[in-house]
Each structure stands twice: as structure tokens, then as C-alpha cells.
């Protein structure tokens, strides 16, 4: 079965750029979405179709996808960006989620 | 803006059937898929399946034999039934609206399987 791999944790200083990766076989041939989940809350879509920004999501969030790796980039990271982030794609009609990455803003 | 709300029992006994309903408000149920996703400490985030306005359903093969999905658009709701539950089915269950991505989620419902 298809798998997506994310680093368990990423740390970043305030106002710096955070990058969270998501790896999967030939992932660049698929669309990737990213979700932000803060403690005790439901996931929120922050990137869809690799790089598109949903309404209401700050332009500090961006995405890319090529080869075997998709990347979520958060520029000018703020304390309120601390959360778990999950990548997601579709494989043969099945939604696949990555294991999640905890972003810590130090 | 679409809103989704899960309802159902928070506690289910092993070997019994879990039944959840998701109420949809703020948007018609046409032109989208309506999905169930669960999250547990042990298995992370797992897609359960979806029902479309057309009535078509699709489930995760890992759960397919135990899952039934349905929709009642006249009541603006859709439902999940999971049979023969075990402790491994303990999770927070979310309903979500989807096309290529899950763009709206319910608040989640913690379901514990225990005697």
C-alpha cells in the first residue's frame, strides 16, 4: 500500500521559514494537500492541489511537489503556526495521510 | 459556509456496531463527496470512506468488509456504520466534505470501544 513519510518534528524560530517535507513514491505525479491541526481542534486545509491556497489561509503558507517529495513552506513563522501538519494524497481512489509533523516555534 | 456535526455514542462495546451520523448545514449536499476520517494515537489519520450525492460509495479496503455508508440528502445528513468493533477502532471520528481535498471538517467525536 502507498505510504507518505513525514519527519515527526520540525523546529523554527519566530519570523524564520519553516519547511515540512512529505515523501512518497513518485509523489510528484499526484496532487498533495496539507492540513494544519492545532491541539484539540479539527484539521484545517491549508494547501490543496500541491500549491493552491484556500480562502482565508495566509499567503505565508505555500506548497510545492516534485519527484518524490512535497514540501509545505511557512514564511515569517508565527507562534500561532504551532500545530501538527499532515500531508495527504490519493492513491487508487484511497485517501492516504502522512504520519504528521509537529511544528514547534521556539 | 458549510458546517458539519457528528453525532452518535461515545462508547461502544466490543463486537457491537458503531453508528454515526453527520449533519450538514450551510450548503447543499450536491456536487461533493461526503467522507469519514478517523484519528487515533496508534494509527494516525485514516480515511474510512465516502458517499457521493449520486449514491456511490467507496471505502478503505482495510475496513471495507465492516463499513456501510449512506446519505439522506433530504435530511442533509450522511451516516457511517462500522460492525464488529474492537479496541483498535477507538478513535476520534470526523466527517468531512471533499472533492480533491477535505475542505470542511466536523468537530470530531471520540468513540471508545470498551466493555
Image (cartoon, coloured by chain):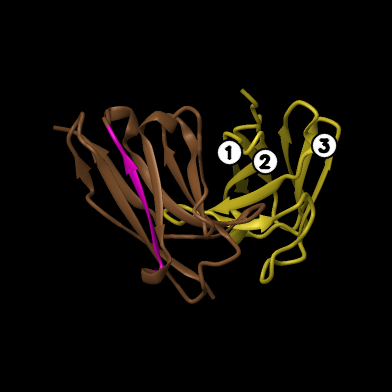
Residue nearest the viewer, comparing A58 with A81: A58
Chain under numbered label 3? A
Per the picture, the main secondary structure of the magenta-coloured stretch is strand
Q: Which residues are magenta?
A: B76-83
Does label 2 lie on the same chain as label 1?
Answer: yes
Counting the numbered discs, the total is: 3
Residue tagged 2: A89
Residue A89 location (% of width, % of height): 67, 41
Few, some or many residues within 10 Å of mark 2 (<14, 14–19, 20+): many
Q: CA distance from mark 3 to mark 2?
A: 10 Å
The N terminus of chain A, quarter of image:
top right
Q: Which residue is mark 3?
A: A29
Q: Where is residue A101, by image quadrant?
A: top right
Q: Gap between marks 1 and 2, in whole Å?
A: 13 Å
> Which chain letter goes with mark 1?
A
Q: Chain of mark 2?
A: A
Residue B7 lies in magenta, yes or no? no
Question: Helix, strand or loop at disc 3?
Answer: helix
Q: Position of residue B65 (x, y in %)?
A: 39, 29
**Disc with the residue nearer the chain's start (1 vs 3):** 3
Tag 1's secondary structure? loop
- Dot 3 or dot 2: first in sequence order is 3
| The disc label shown at residue A100, or none | 1
Whether labels 3 and 2 belong to a single chain: the reply is yes
The chain displayed brown equals B
Residue lying at 27% horizontally and 32% vertically, measured from the top left: B85
Depth check, mark 1 against mark 3: the one in front is 3
| Label 1 with label 2: CB-CB less than 8 Å | no
Amino acid at each position: 500500500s502507498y505510504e507518505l513519510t513525514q519527519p515527526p518534528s520540525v523546529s523554527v524560530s519566530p519570523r524564520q521559514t519553516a519547511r515540512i517535507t512529505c515523501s512518497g513514491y513518485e509523489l510528484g505525479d499526484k496532487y498533495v494537500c496539507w492540513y494544519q491541526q492545532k491541539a484539540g481542534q479539527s484539521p484545517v486545509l491549508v494547501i490543496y492541489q500541491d500549491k493552491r491556497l484556500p480562502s482565508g489561509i495566509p499567503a505565508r503558507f505555500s506548497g510545492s511537489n516534485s519527484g518524490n517529495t512535497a514540501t509545505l513552506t511557512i514564511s515569517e513563522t508565527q507562534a500561532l503556526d504551532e500545530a501538527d501538519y499532515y500531508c495527504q494524497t490519493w492513491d487508487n481512489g484511497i485517501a492516504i495521510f502522512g504520519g504528521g509533523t509537529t511544528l514547534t516555534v521556539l | 459556509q458549510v458546517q458539519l456535526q457528528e453525532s452518535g455514542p461515545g462508547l461502544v462495546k466490543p463486537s457491537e456496531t458503531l453508528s454515526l451520523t453527520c449533519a450538514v448545514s450551510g450548503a447543499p449536499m450536491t456536487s461533493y463527496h461526503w467522507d469519514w476520517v478517523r484519528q487515533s494515537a496508534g494509527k494516525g489519520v485514516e480515511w474510512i470512506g465516502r458517499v457521493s450525492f449520486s449514491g456511490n460509495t467507496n471505502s478503505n479496503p482495510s475496513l471495507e468488509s465492516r463499513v456501510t455508508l449512506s446519505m439522506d440528502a433530504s435530511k442533509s445528513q450522511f451516516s457511517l456504520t462500522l460492525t464488529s468493533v474492537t479496541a483498535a477502532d477507538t478513535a476520534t471520528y470526523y466527517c468531512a466534505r471533499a472533492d480533491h481535498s477535505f475542505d470542511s471538517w466536523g468537530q470530531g467525536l471520540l468513540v471508545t470501544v470498551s466493555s
